[in-house]
Image (spheres, rainbow, N blue to C red):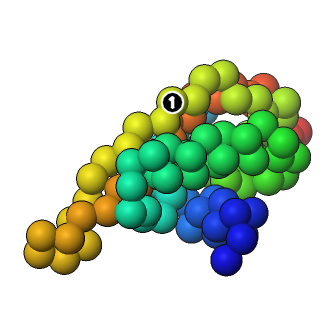
Amino acid sequence: MNKFAKVSSAIAAAVLISSASFAGSNSGSTTLYTGTYDSASAAYEAGFDVIDDLAQASQGELKSTLKTYNEGVVRNLSIDDTKVKVEEVAVARNVYQYRAMIDVDFEFDGGSDD
């Protein structure tokens, strides 16, 4: 599997751990996960690849990936800040791998579609 396919599948399989976008609020945050890797450095690289993909994503792709659950219309969605952390996960007894967690803070213009 090439690097682009791995990153694309990581975004497609990204897990939403929290979404803090509330009605009337113009900001939100979410955490995305990559797949697992044999080394921490490979997980960090995958995490930064996800950030690169987010930076190049269209508004529609961002809305889908960031899961902007807002009562009104979401416009002008933009990424404010991103952080990559890597955690060790046990995939079996005494077998460990690493995955990146990408914390994403974002802003948007919201409102009703009336």
Q: Along the horizontal axis of the image, is 6 left or right of 90? A: right
Question: Taking the image as drawn, is residue 47 in sight?
Answer: yes
Q: Along the horizontal axis of the image, is 11 left or right of 92? A: right
| Outermost residue to the left | 93
**Image location (x, y in percent) of residue 24:** 63, 25
Q: Which residue is disc 1 drawn over? A: 83
Near mark 1 (Cα within 10 A), the count class, few <14, some 14-19 or many ≥20, is some
Q: How many numbered discs sit on the rendered protein? A: 1
Give the camera-side residue of 19 and 96.
Answer: 96
The amino acid type of the residue labelled 1 equals Lys
**Image location (x, y in percent) of residue 55:** 78, 37
User: Which residue lies at the image location 64% right of the left edge and 29% below the top edge?
Assistant: 106
Give the camera-side residue of 77 and 111.
Answer: 77
User: Which residue lies at the image location 45% right of the left edge and 46% below the top edge?
Assistant: 41
- Quadrant of the snapshot with the C terminus: top right
Q: Give the answer, above or below, for where 59 lies relative to 10.
A: above
Specify the quadrant of the image occupied by residue 104.
top right
